[in-house]
Every structure is written in C-alpha cells, then in structure tokens.
Amino acid sequence: MIRLLVCCLFFLHLAEVCSAQFNTKIGYRAAWVQFDDYNSLLDDFNNERDWLDDTFKDLRLQQAVMMGGRYRWSNIALEFTGIFGFNSTKARGTDPAGNVSFFKQFAYRQAGGSLGVEFFAGLFSVGSSINWENFIVRTSDRSGGRKTEIMKEQGWSAQFFLSISSPRSANLALSLRPYIQLYQNDWDFSPAYEELGVAADKNSIEESMAFGVQVIFYNGK
C-alpha cells in the first residue's frame, strides 16, 4: 500500500513537472520562394493583355499561421506545429475585342504539420524539423464564385532555423526565427499553365525551396 502511494505521488510529481514545461505556441511565418518560370508565365499573360484593370501578382511570398505546442527540458525542446497557409492573386478586365468581361483568380493554400527539435544557449537556439505539407491551387472564373481545385502537391520537407527569444515574462515569450526549408519534391504547375491556355513544358516543374522568418508567441510557465 505504501509502495502504491509512493508510486502515485511520484507520477503526480512527474506530471506536474511535465506540465510546467509545456508551452502552447501561435505564430506567423512569411516565406520567400523562387518560382521564376511560373511568375514569368503570369507576367507574360499580363503584358499580352494591356486591357486588364487588375493583373496577376507574382507568387514570391507565402504566408501562414502556425499553432502548436512545445515540451522543453532544460536546454532542449520538442515541438509540434500545425501550418495553415494562404495567398491569392487575380486578374480582371474587359477584352475590347468582343467587349467580354474577364476574371480569373488563383488561390494558393498550404496545410500540414511538423515535428522538430530545438537546442538552447541562453536566448539563442538552433533547431530543425521534419514537415509534411500540402500545396493546393484553386481557381475561379468569377468574383465570389466557387473555386475549383486544379493542382495539389504534397510531400516531406526539412527545415533548419536559428532563433532568438525575448527574456521570458511570467506567462509569455516572443521568438524571432529565420529559417530555410528544403522540399523533397519539385512542384508541377502544369495545371496552372493549362488554365491560362499555355501548353505545359519542362518549365512548369519548379524546384521547391523557401527562405523565411517566423514570429512565434509561447504561452506557459
């Protein structure tokens, strides 16, 4: 009976220690990508139609919201994160050749998760993570209309980062984290080419790599 009581007290203490080291996290990330051929396609489409009132913007910046948690033991931590990305661009105008209204929107979405490890030295830290992400492109031919999925790329990636954190207050800490992300697979933009009436070729395959920065708030003891 005494042994059982001691074991219960031990596990209660262990649970208390673990919970004291757990932090919830919420943040924002901005990633810069280099889809040069795809962006050239959008630029050519714009330049060939000088009657467009709104033109397609290049896909160079991807934004995402992050939510998750972190377990920290002294100078090492384990993180898990959900990633929800969003971006869009549109072109519209009236073609004078037939006085026909034109509208086309591309909506870019990212969703996935990551599991990472982080090593601390004072306010600085380094780390890496393994990510699984979906990159989805949807299109619509009218403003406010239902979007149709035309492209879906998914796969693994590796992320490496350096982080600097603010001195921790009672319940909140801020971390600034520049990073590089290397994707296992290239992304095939052929459906987007075809959507714009351009035959897809080898240029529709884009290498996937991103440089970015994350701003993260950690809540907890």
Image: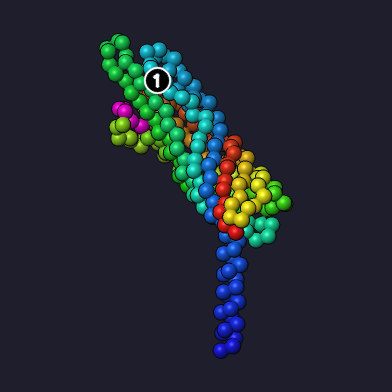
**From the viewer's perspective, is residue 103 above or below residue 145?**
above
Q: Residues within 10 Å of mark 1 (few under 14, many from 20)?
A: few
Q: Indicate the position of residue 178 as horizontal and vertical percent values.
A: 63, 40
Name, please, the residue furthest toward the right. 121
**From the viewer's perspective, is residue 177 above or below residue 193?**
below
In the image shown, does 34 or 68 lie closer to the viewer? 68
Q: Which quadrant is home to the C terminus?
A: bottom right
Q: Which residue is found at the position 32% from the left and 20% from the top?
A: 102
Q: Indicate the position of residue 51 as horizontal and vertical percent values.
A: 37, 13
Q: Which quadrant is home to the N terminus?
A: bottom right
Q: Indicate the position of residue 189 as horizontal and vertical percent values.
A: 44, 31
**From the viewer's perspective, is residue 141 above or below residue 212?**
above
Q: Which residue is found at the position 70% from the left and 47% from the top?
A: 124
In the image shown, does 153 or 117 lie closer to the viewer? 117
| Among the 4 quarters of the image, the one containing residue 16 | bottom right
In the image shown, does 68 or 123 lie closer to the viewer? 123
Residue type at the position of mark 1: Asp
Helix, strand or loop at mark 1: strand
Name, please, the residue furthest toward the bottom. 1
Question: As drawn, is 41 to the left or to the right of 175?
Answer: left
Asked whether 152 falls inside the magenta stretch, the response is no
- Magenta extent: 139-143
Query: Could one spot residue 194 in this view of the protein?
Result: no
Question: As drawn, is 120 to the left or to the right of 59?
Answer: right
Question: As drawn, is 191 to the left or to the right of 4?
Answer: left
Q: Which residue is found at the position 35% from the left and 25% from the top?
A: 104
Question: As drawn, is 80 to the left or to the right of 110?
Answer: right
From the image, tell me which residue sits under label 1: 54
